[in-house]
Image (cartoon, helix red, strand yellow):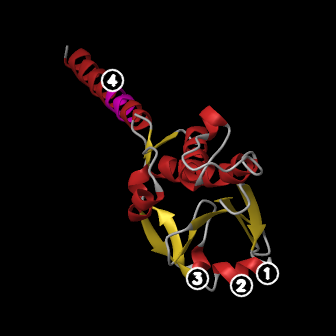
C-alpha cells in the first residue's frame, strides 16, 4: 500500500509540474514579447521604401487623401506611408494627424542614428520623410511639393538638399513609441 501511495503521489506531482509548465508556455505565447514588438518595428521600417515608392509622382493637393482622391499633401502622405507600413508589420498606427499635430508626437534623433521613416524638419516645420538609407549612408527623401504640384523624391547628394534643406534645418525627428502599437 505504501508503494502504491508513493507512486500515486509521484505521478500526481509530475502531472502537476507538466500541466504548470504547459500553462506558462501557453500564457507566454499569447502575450506579445518585447522581442516581438522590436521585430514588428523592424518590419515597419523595412516596409517603408517600397510603400513610399508607390506615392512618388502622384499629384499634390492640399488636404488630398491618396486613398480617396489619388492626390496628397504632406500630412496624408506621411499618414499613408506610416499606416500601410504599420499594417504590414502587424501594428496599428495612431491615425491621421496634420503636420502641426504630428510633430509633437515625435522626438529629436541624432543624425548618426537615422532610420527609414524618420523626418527631416525645417525651421518652418515643413518636413520630408527619409524613406530609405542605402548601405553607403545616402538618404532618400519623399515629400509633397506644393511648388512642383506632386509627390517628389530626392537624395542627400542633390544640391537642393544642401542649399535648401540643410540651410533651413531644424532637426531629424522620429515617431514616438505611442504612435505605433501592437494590434490587440
Residue at 56 percent across and 47 percent down: it is 76
Residue at mark 3 to residue at mark 2: CA–CA distance: 9 Å
Task: Please report the residue visible at 42 percent of the width from the left and 45 percent of the height from the top.
Answer: 94
Mark 3 neighbour density, 10 Å: few (under 14) some (14–19) many (20 or more): some
Could you tell me how far apart the alpha carbons at marks 3 and 4 are, in whole angstroms? Answer: 69 Å
**Lower sequence index among marks 3 and 2:** 2
Asked if residue 93 lies left or right of residue 155, the reply is left
**Which residue position holds label 1?**
159
Residue that mark 4 sits on: 15
Magenta residue check for 99: no
Q: What's the magenta bit mostly, secondary-structure-wise?
A: helix
Q: In the figure, is residue 137 to the left or right of 78?
A: right
Residue under numbered circle 3 = 168
Q: Which residues are magenta?
A: 18-24
Q: Earlier in the sequence, mark 3 or mark 4?
A: 4
Residue 1 sits in quarter: top left
Tell me whether circle 2 and circle 1 mark residues in contact (CB < 8 Å): yes
Kind of element beneath mark 3: loop
Residue 20 belongs to the span the image colors magenta:
yes
Residue 163, position in %: x, y? 71, 84
Residue contact at pointers 3 and 4, CB within 8 angstroms: no
Residue 135 or residue 31, whichever sits in front: 135
Amino acid at each position: 500500500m505504501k508503494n502504491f501511495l508513493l507512486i500515486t503521489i509521484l505521478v500526481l506531482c509530475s502531472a502537476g509540474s507538466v500541466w504548470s509548465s504547459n500553462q506558462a508556455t501557453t500564457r507566454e505565447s499569447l502575450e506579445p514579447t518585447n522581442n516581438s514588438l522590436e521585430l514588428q518595428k523592424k518590419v515597419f521600417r523595412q516596409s517603408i521604401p517600397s510603400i513610399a515608392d508607390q506615392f512618388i509622382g502622384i499629384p499634390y493637393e492640399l488636404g488630398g487623401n491618396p486613398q480617396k482622391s489619388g492626390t496628397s499633401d504632406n500630412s496624408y502622405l506621411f499618414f499613408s506611408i506610416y499606416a500601410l507600413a504599420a499594417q504590414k508589420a502587424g501594428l496599428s498606427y495612431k491615425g491621421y494627424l496634420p503636420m502641426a499635430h504630428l510633430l509633437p508626437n515625435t522626438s529629436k534623433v541624432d543624425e548618426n542614428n537615422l532610420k527609414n521613416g524618420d523626418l527631416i524638419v525645417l525651421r518652418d516645420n515643413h518636413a520630408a520623410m527619409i524613406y530609405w538609407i542605402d548601405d553607403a549612408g545616402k538618404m532618400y527623401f519623399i515629400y509633397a511639393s506644393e511648388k512642383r504640384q506632386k509627390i517628389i523624391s530626392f537624395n542627400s547628394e542633390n544640391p537642393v538638399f544642401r542649399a535648401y534643406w540643410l540651410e533651413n534645418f531644424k532637426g531629424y525627428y522620429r515617431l514616438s513609441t505611442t504612435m505605433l502599437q501592437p494590434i490587440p
